[in-house]
Amino acid sequence: MNNQKLPALLAPQTNWSERVTVALVRVAGYLSIVFVSLICLFLLREGLPALVNVPLLSLFGTTWYPIEARFGLLPLLLGSLTVTIGAACIAVPLGIGTAVYISEIAPQWAKETLKPLVEILAGLPSVVLGFIGILVLAPALRRALSLNTGMTAFTGALLLAWASIPTIVSVAEDALNAVPRSYREASAALGATRWQTIWMVTVPAARSGVLTGIMLGIGRVIGETMAVMMVTGNAPVMAFGPSALFSPVRTMTATIAAEMGEVAKGSTHYQVLFLIGIVLFVFSLVINLTVFYVGARHAARKQRLLS
């Protein structure tokens, strides 16, 4: 008798807990949209007046010298692109290769060791990376490459690659592990070698997750501030060609961090710094939309194959 009443007594409580959970998740989702919208509105309110107070052609100038009201953004944009592209060229092949090794090749004891180490590496603070760059990496590069200074875009690219590799490895490795084992068995049954199976079956099947990891790693590089500010020399100069990688540069994030604390609120300089923030916000939005598009396209293709 009591056993028959037990489900009836628990049902209302279960339904109540489910309703509370759904409501909390819904509120959290709405709050995230509200917070992002408020951030976007705040950036637009503080940064868009710079387009009125500063001639548009001046913003595309090659000189960043706020004391003389020269707000050319091209040196900052070029510095960010140089460091980001350099870091991506280093981090992407190393990250994907490491993820493939952990997922497909490494023995079980190595997987259990490498995976936690990668997670620990992802948790290193940016300031710690910056100190390592100043004390170890920059002097070593200056001596090895016979440079005038070790504070260059290449130093920043190496540090940012170090910072982004754990993100790429973690996401890509999870995507590779999610590939059904039947894919590998079918490839082996057709006579493919282990490497052929990895590069022609497993990696393409996990392409969406691998690209997501790459995009998130690049997003980490673009948004990094302290490490890149400490090791790139902070020189807003225009440099082109291979020599640009071994010259001091200044990124957009480093400019905001270095100058926002000293600028007068409401001044033109203040507004231009927020305009730089808008540019960074647009870059992050483009990266997230790209990740969403790649994932949705991959899911649609998989659905078509299954149907």
Image: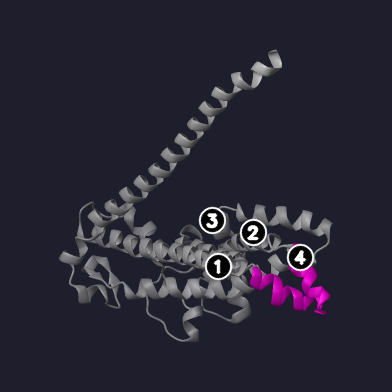
Q: Nearer the viewer, mark 3 or mark 4?
A: 4
Alpha carbon distance from label 2 to label 1: 20 Å
Q: Which amino acid does label 4 sit on?
A: Ser
Q: Give the range drawn in magenta.
A: 181-205
Task: Between label 3 and label 1, give the one nearer the viewer.
Answer: 1
Indicate which disc, 3 or 2, sits on the residue closer to the N terminus.
3
Q: What separation in Å lies between label 1 and label 4 (alpha carbons)? A: 19 Å
Instruction: Identify the mark at residue 182; answer none if there is no mark.
Output: 4
Helix, strand or loop: magenta stretch: helix
Residue 59 x/y as whole percent = 25, 72
Mark earlier in primary sequence (4, 2): 2
State the CA–CA distance, disc 3 to disc 4.
41 Å
Task: Check whether the beta carbons of the residues at disc 4 and disc 2 lie within 8 A of each other.
Answer: no
Position of residue 200 relative to residue 277, above or below, is below
Q: Earlier in the sequence, mark 3 or mark 1?
A: 3
Q: Distance between the residues labelled 4 and 2?
A: 23 Å
Question: Would you place residue 29 above or below residue 258 in this image?
Answer: above
- The residue that mark 1 highlights is 298
Residue, x 27% and y 77% (percent of image)?
Answer: 61
Instruction: Verify CB contact (< 8 Å) between mark 3 and mark 2.
Output: no
Residue that label 3 marks? 126
**SS type, badge 4:** helix
Residue bearing mark 2: 170
Residue at 53 percent across and 54 percent down: it is: 127
Specify the label residue 107 is tagged with.
Answer: none
Task: Name the one closer to the observer, 142 or 208.
Answer: 208
Q: Which residue lies furthest to the top in this view?
A: 1
Disc 1 marks a residue whose amino acid type is: His
